[in-house]
Image (tube, rainbow, N blue to C red):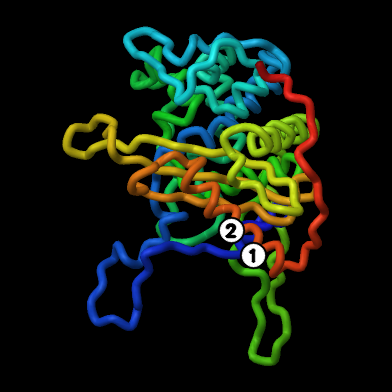
Amino acid sequence: MQDPRTGEILAIVSWPWFDPNEHEFSTKDLKIPAIHDVFEPGSTFKIVSAASALDEGAFAEDDIIYCENGKYKFADRVINDHEKRDYLTFEGVFAYSSNIGFAKIGNKVGKERLYYWMRQFGFGAWTGINMAGEQKGLMLSPKSRGWTVVTTPNISYGQGVGVTGLQVINAYSCIANGGILYEPSIIKSVFDDGGNVLDAMGPREIRRALSPDIARRLRSLLVKAVGYGTGQQAQVKGYTVAGKTGTAQKIDPATRKYAADRHIASFCGFLPAKNPALVILVVIDEPKGNYWASEVACPSFREVAAKAMNYMKIPRKETPYEFTKISR
């Protein structure tokens, strides 16, 4: 959980946990997955492609994209969508999370600008949280030999890039607060024995990553994704939620190929959408049975978010999802 207005990390929780009073534990037990583990994000990463497309003027929300009825052959790969769709607007591609649509978006934007926007959001770099063992993630340079013709579309929908949970929530906080990327912090103040403040850790701005207009348009897309798209089960009664699902296949270490039975499901969202007070990221590593983020990560987000709003005493204001779909 993060306060998007300051970058403050309000909670980091992982399960299963371990008892530090136990006599035997490994260094692996001491890791904080949100900071120390790198994973492929899947569709939560589509905010990068969407930001690049909107800011570069490559697409507008009502532009039409052909989604190939769920199967798209590109180079030597076949890109598949979970649901077969023909024509969608850019908004619809985002809300329904079409990999095919985003592959086409990424190819139009181009690898150089896509890479630029990944860096703008803070991916491939330390966040500045100043905790031992933080990972930078894995990100190819577009000038490297490893970046092939299929890398651009893959990265556009969150495959072929490694991130940490901390990087993801920090990027969504940037959208939530209107475009400022902050250093995440876990210490608010330092006091001496007499209770005097030695150091008040105020918000530390890294940069303005998004213009207020692009942040507003992304926030609107994220609201639609929860309103009628893949994130519907993340809706919290009394609040408008903005967010995005992500379901990614994991690499099998033995074969070095994507495993059909191993996934990471995630949802990152913030609320209340108009004046965000809290950003929450839920990541479930290798869910059993149903592995789609819409089915396993969204309900977890909903339960945690509802309790957090109550704890923070943020009053409910019934804001039903009333909007005109510009998707087909």
Q: Which amino acid does label 1 sit on?
A: Lys
The percent position of residue 154, horizontal first and vertical second, equals: 43, 22
**What residue do we see at 24% from left, 37% from top?**
252
Please indicate, yes or no, whether residue 53 appears anywhere in the rendered image.
yes
Residue 102, x across and y down, in percent: 54, 20
- Label 1, secondary structure: give it: helix
48 left or right of 200 in image: left
Residue 66 picture location, percent across and down: 57, 9
* Front-most of residues 120 and 296: 296
The quarter in which the C terminus is drawn is top right
Please tell me which residue lies in front, 222 or 168. Answer: 222
Would you name the residue on which mark 1 appears? Answer: 307
Please name the residue that numbered disc 2 is placed on. 303
36, above or below 114, in the image:
below
Q: In which quarter of the image is the N terminus?
A: bottom right
Give the residue furthest to the bottom: 194
Residue 165 numbered mark, or none: none
Q: How crowded is mark 1: few (under 14 residues within 10 Å), some or many (20 or more)?
A: few
Q: Nearer the viewer, residue 301 or 22?
A: 301
Element at label 2: helix
Q: Are marks 1 and 2 in contact (CB under 8 Å)?
A: yes
Seen at 24% across and 82% down, the residue is 23
Query: Horizontally, is 279 left or right of 82 in the view?
Result: right
Q: Is residue 169 above or below residue 119?
A: below
Give the spatial CA distance, label 1 vs label 2: 6 Å
